[in-house]
Image (spheres, helix red, strand yellow):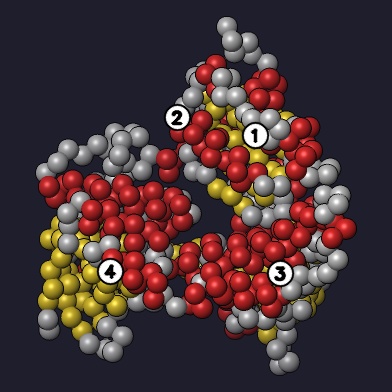
Amino acid sequence: MPTTEYDVIVIGAGAVGENVADRAVQGGMRVALVEAELVGGECSYWACMPSKALLRAGDVVRAARHVDGASQAVTGEIDVAKVLARRDSFTSDWDDSGQVEWVRGAGIDLVRGHARFTAPKTLELTAPDGAVSTLTARHAVVVSTGSVALLPDIPGLAGATPWTSREATSAHAVPARFTVLGGGVVACELATAYASLGSAVTLVSRGELLANQEPFAGEAVAASLRDLGVTLHLGVSPTRVERRDDGSVLTTLPDGTAVESDEILVATGRLPRTGDLGLEALGLTPGDWLETDDTLRVLGADGSPHDGGWLYATGDVNHRALLTHQGKYQARAAGDVIAARAAGAPVVDRPWGRHAATADHRAVPQVTFTDPQVASIGLTAAAAEKAGVRIRVVDYEIGSVAGASVHTDGYAGTARMVVDEDRGVVVGATFVGADVQELLHSATVAVVGEVPLERLWHAVPSYPTISEVWLRLLETYGRDLSA
């Protein structure tokens, strides 16, 4: 069995794994990037990019219908075939040739196949043609295999061949009737997308929508989904799901309500893709999340780096923050610190140091591309109080800002700023409304930079833009910041 040695082996060539490999190569390392499916991973082909492509047409049409003059020009319906064709262009028709070219151009060795640990720093690789070889790492192995959809234990669900986000984002036909199980980001976004494309959508969630966000966010999204014609059943979980002989799906709710649909989507959470990596050879449990320190080294049961610290985990698989941009942030830290440790260079692993993924804890930005959009960073008011932070919460209606009135007739939205009263800094912000995603990075800089409110007052927003809401939030806060 042939054996090839590398400085670093990265398992999983999604956006996160690609970034780990690239940073390690830039640090002078010889790197193998192992992938069993498509180079580019979940985000490129079944998540971030295709889902946003499915959402965009409906978003644009609704935006135009809320501006007098433009609304009169919108006389037709969304062209579903064109939307799906545009989505296909984003995924390159699920052809990864372009991403393969980038990987090779970056000086990374791409290895196709499935990898399993057989010993520390040692992997058995099974190629697509069945050939078996061995890869060994001098310095580090990085697990960047991501996550898979969680299938809840609902009688009949597994046998009903439900869709996951993969099927929903790659479908080439829109079901006339569509049931969505879940109330998180994926469920809300895909319910919005399919309702916009003409499906009669029913969403069933055991809790409120977007439960980890500020309450007003989920309430606004729920109201919008109802306006789109989506039927919501909140606070309930199905008692049974059945795929009938005619291909339709029957979902039964606790009160006996029967929901009929042509397809059903499960969007109720994620599980780590670690079940078939041979983790047992390392004394770790297959199927578990891989807990890490802030330099992304996998931790053992005693809380110290596992087996001396050669094993790393980045992205969804470590359960720190299941977001592509956060995984890429971790990847940069991991690739750089692996190269630094191999060279005996200084490791800057203090909070906010270049080798520490500090933002994972209290500075995670996220946009939910529903209508209205929800953009948030840092702590919600409830999370801050739970953490023992003495806070003041400031809310402002975004529609009262001049820039919002220019943007959309009857603009409706809310901004919230959560202030740490003892330190005088923003620790959380949430914006709900049209196009608020472009407000988020300013809030991210304020939270990560721990910018004092007295200094933030001097960050003058341009007029007339929606960003003027920052000025109104500070004015509402009511403190004499110029003193």
Earlier-in-chain disc, 1 versus 2: 2
Residue type, label 4: Arg
> Is disc 1 placed on a helix, strand or loop?
helix
Disc 1 residue type (three-letter) = Ser
Which label lies toward us, 1 or 2? 1
Please tell me how crowded label 2 is: few (under 14), some (14-19), or many (20+) other residues with Cα within 10 Å. Answer: few
Q: Which mark is residue 104?
A: 4
Residue that label 3 marks: 194
Residue at (21, 76) in percent of width and height: 124
Q: Which residue is mark 2?
A: 449
- For label 1, count other residues whose C-alpha is less than 10 Å away and answer few (under 14), some (14-19) or many (20+): many
Marks 3/1 in contact by CB < 8 Å: the verdict is no
- Which label's residue is closer to the chain start, 4 or 2? 4
Q: Position of residue 405 (x, y in %)?
A: 79, 38
- Placement of the N terminus among the 4 image quadrants: bottom left
Q: State whether residue 156 is above or below residue 224.
A: below
Q: CA distance from mark 4 to mark 3?
A: 37 Å
In this rendering, would 445 be left or right of 8? right
The residues bearing labels 3 and 2 have C-alpha atoms spaced at a distance of: 39 Å
Q: Residue furthest top?
A: 483
Give me the residue at 69% from left, 25% from top: 472
Q: Nearer the viewer, residue 64 or 214?
A: 64
**Sequence-wise, which precedes: disc 4 or disc 3?**
4
Say how many tags the image has.
Answer: 4
Label 3, label 1: how far apart the Cα atoms are: 31 Å
